[in-house]
Image (tube, grey):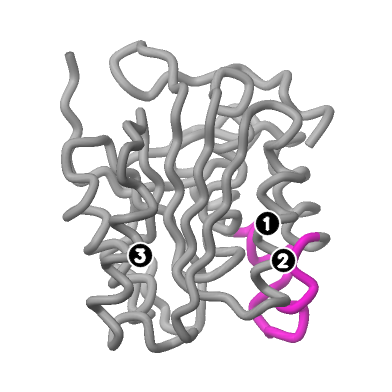
Amino acid sequence: MAGVGTAPMISLVAGRPVRTVVCLGAHPDDIEIGCAGTLLRLAPEATEVLFVITSGDDRRKREAEESAHRLLGDHCAVRVQVGELADGFVAYDASRAKSFLRDSVTGVTPDVVFAPSRHDLHQDHRFVAEVALQVLRDHLILEYEIPKYDGDLVPPNLYVPLSTELLRAKVDHLRGSFESQHDKPWYRPEVFQSLATIRGIECHAEDGAAEGFHARKVVLG
C-alpha cells in the first residue's frame, strides 16, 4: 500500500529490527482487523511477512491473497497460505488444523508472531491462539483483538500507536478488500475506528489511535 510507509518504524524485540513476521488467522480478514496498522508500521523494515489462515472458500481465499499483497506488497515479500478447513469447525478438526498451522511455519524464524487472542470466544480464533503458543512458543507472540457480538474484548497490555494516516489506511483497506463481509452488521468503519480510538486513549497515543495486543510472555535481551 503506497503512501503510508513514512510512519515511524518500530522495533519490537529489544531494539532489534523486525525482519520476519508471521501472522496467524482463522479466517481471511482476521489479521487485517487485528493488526493491519501495526503491519504497516513494520513493513518498511520487514523483509518477509507470512500470512497463515486456516479456513476460506475460493472467494475468501482470493480476498485474503489480494488483501495481503495490497497491504504490504510494496514494502516486502508476502506469502499467503489458506487452509481448507470449514469456517466454524476449525477447533473440531483439531488434528488437521494443527498440522496445517505447524507445517506452514516450519523452517520460519519470525521476529514477531501475530495471532488471535486466547480471550476470544470464537472457537476458531481461540484454537489458533492456542496452537500458536504450541508451535511458535520460542518467539514473541502478540495476540490481536477482533470486535464482535460476543463482547469478549479484554484490556490489552501492549499498544502500538497509529497515526491518523495509518488508521485511515487500515479502515479503507478493510472496506475495500473484503466485500464478502459487507453484509455483516459489525463490519463497519466506525467499529474499527472506535476500537482504535479507545486503545489510543488508553495509551495516550499522539494522534489518538492505537491497536491493542496481549503479550503473554516477553523476553528482553
Which labelled disc corresponds to residue 206? Answer: none
Q: Are marks 2 and 1 in contact (CB under 8 Å)?
A: yes
- Residue 117 shown in magenta: no
Displayed quadrant of residue 134: bottom left
- Residue 183 shown in magenta: yes
User: Is 63 displayed left or right of 134 in the figure?
Assistant: right
Q: Secondary structure at mark 1?
A: helix
Dot 3 or dot 1, earlier in sequence: 1
User: Is 215 displayed left or right of 190 in the figure?
Assistant: left
Question: In the rendered image, which residue does mark 1 sit on?
Answer: 65
Dot 3 or dot 2, earlier in sequence: 2
CA gap, disc 2 and disc 1: 5 Å
CA gap, disc 3 and disc 2: 19 Å
Q: Are marks 3 and 1 in contact (CB under 8 Å)?
A: no
Mark 3: few/some/many CA within 10 Å (<14, 14-19, 20+): some
Q: Amino acid at mark 2?
A: Arg
Question: In the rendered image, which residue does mark 3 sit on?
Answer: 100
Displayed quadrant of residue 66: bottom right
Which labelled disc corresponds to residue 62? Answer: 2
Q: Residue at x 35, y 39 (%)?
A: 158
Q: Residue at x 22, y 63 (%)?
A: 130
Q: Amino acid at mark 1?
A: Glu
Q: Are marks 3 and 2 in contact (CB under 8 Å)?
A: no
Residue 75 on image: x %, y %: 69, 26
Q: Secondary structure at mark 3?
A: helix
Residue 176 on image: x %, y %: 83, 60
Q: Nearer the viewer, residue 210 or 142?
A: 142
Q: Secondary structure at mark 2?
A: helix
Q: Which residues are magenta?
A: 177-194
